Amino acid sequence: MKAATLKKPGGLDNIVIADRDQPEAGPGELLVKVAANSLNYHDYVVALGGIPTVDGRILMSDGAGEVVSVGEGVSGWSAGDHALSVFFPGWADGPGENEKRLGVPGDHADGFAAEYVAAPARAFTKAPKDYSFAEAATLPCAALTAWRALFVSTQTKPGDIVLVQGSGGVSIFALQFAKAAGATVIATSSSGEKLERLTALGADHVINYKEEADWGKAALQWTAGRGVDTVVEIGGPGTLTQSIHACRTGGHIGLIGVLTGLSGEVPTALFFQKNLVMTGITVGSQADQRDMIAAIDANGIKPVIDTHFPLDQVADAFQHQAAQKHFGKIVIDIPGDASG
Ligand SMILES: NC(=O)c1ccc[n+]([C@@H]2O[C@H](COP(=O)([O-])OP(=O)(O)OC[C@H]3O[C@@H](n4cnc5c(N)ncnc54)[C@H](OP(=O)(O)O)[C@@H]3O)[C@@H](O)[C@H]2O)c1
């Protein structure tokens, strides 16, 4: 079977489409014919060699496909079911202690950029109803992270004001989930055209963060000084100060991303003066994923897919992502060979 693998030390030139033996479902495992992956910033950092992995690692944390066979001792799954990967196969539910967050596919373990994957049944949930495999593959990392920032680390409710940053995978899901929950959404972007598309998706107010450096204060002003209830913080140190400005007293910041770096200054006095709460977020558990899928099924939310690339163009897909021209998710299609 074909798989997109990474040769050490990494870098997009070191992505190799390799021939690998087709796996079989062992006891407790599912064999899934993978039909699609989606790209996350995390996968890009792995591909660049920024997160050390073993030589020949199969890339990509997110995958969706059809169950081909069910290993001994597995219940609740049948051949033909639509399976969706989970980011943390060891995190069933409850708090995410460190030991539950090992074995991330495409990083600590082989990932889903392959025609077939055999993995323990706990590495999958069922996919949403009426979703294509490409649509399902957008969910495990980006959508679940947005879900957790809005409905697990805080409880977004009708009438809340949510601020989302940029138009990448996490932020567009956050916009869609927040609107479905009855919230008002402020969205930012570096591009006027993307701001129009965010408005078309339901954003109530948009701000160009390149043109308005004080976008957090602008958001506060738009709320007539009240402030937002929750910020879905994907920028990190370069955006956190403005996020703090945007919040209401007692507001919540879901700290998710590293797009502007890994550490920086925090206006601590403003943070406590506003009595803010900030939660660090690492994706979510399998139980969170099932809850999110129930909400998707109930609300008919569909992901925004920017572009599809075939498996042998994974490096091109990463270049497209790095250029930040995308709006929503980038998908890898894996047509596969029925003979394996
Ligand atoms: N902690 C976790 O569990 C977790 C899970 C998923 C993702 N993440 C992190 O969250 C971040 C976003 O991930 P993603 O997969 O959604 O990435 P993505 O799809 O590649 O999104 C990139 C988009 O973010 C926006 N952006 C970039 N710099 C920005 C800035 N300074 N201010 C506001 N927006 C900015 C841009 O939107 P415009 O083009 O519209 O300006 C860009 O297109 C990454 O750092 C990723 O590592 C963390």
Image (cartoon, helix red, strand yellow):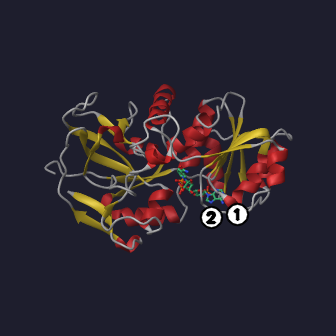
120 vs 178, left or right, is: left
Residue 247: percent from left, percent from top = 77, 44
Q: Amino acid at mark 1?
A: Gly
Question: Where is 221 relative to 71, above or below?
Answer: below
Q: Quadrant of residue 222?
A: top right
157 vs 23, left or right, is: right
Residue 280: percent from left, percent from top = 61, 47
Q: Quadrant of residue 73?
A: top left
Residue 94: percent from left, percent from top = 50, 34
Whether label 1 touches label 2, CB < 8 Å: yes
Other-residue count near label 1 (Cα within 10 Å), few / some / many at <14 / 14–19 / ≥20: few
Q: Amino acid at mark 2?
A: Gly
Other-residue count near label 2 (Cα within 10 Å), few / some / many at <14 / 14–19 / ≥20: few
Q: Quadrant of residue 275?
A: top right
Q: Specify whether tag 2 is near ligand 1 (CB below 8 Å).
A: no
Specify the farthest residue to the left.
339
Front residue (pair 7, 88): 88
Observer able to see residue 7: yes
* Residue occupied by mark 1: 264
Ligand 1 resides in the quarter of the picture at bottom right
| Residue that appears at 20% across and 37% down | 71
Residue 57: percent from left, percent from top = 32, 62
Front residue (pair 133, 170): 170
**Element under label 1?**
loop
* Residue occupied by mark 2: 261
**Element under label 2?**
loop
Disc number lying in front (1 or 2): 1
Q: CA distance from mark 1 to mark 2?
A: 8 Å
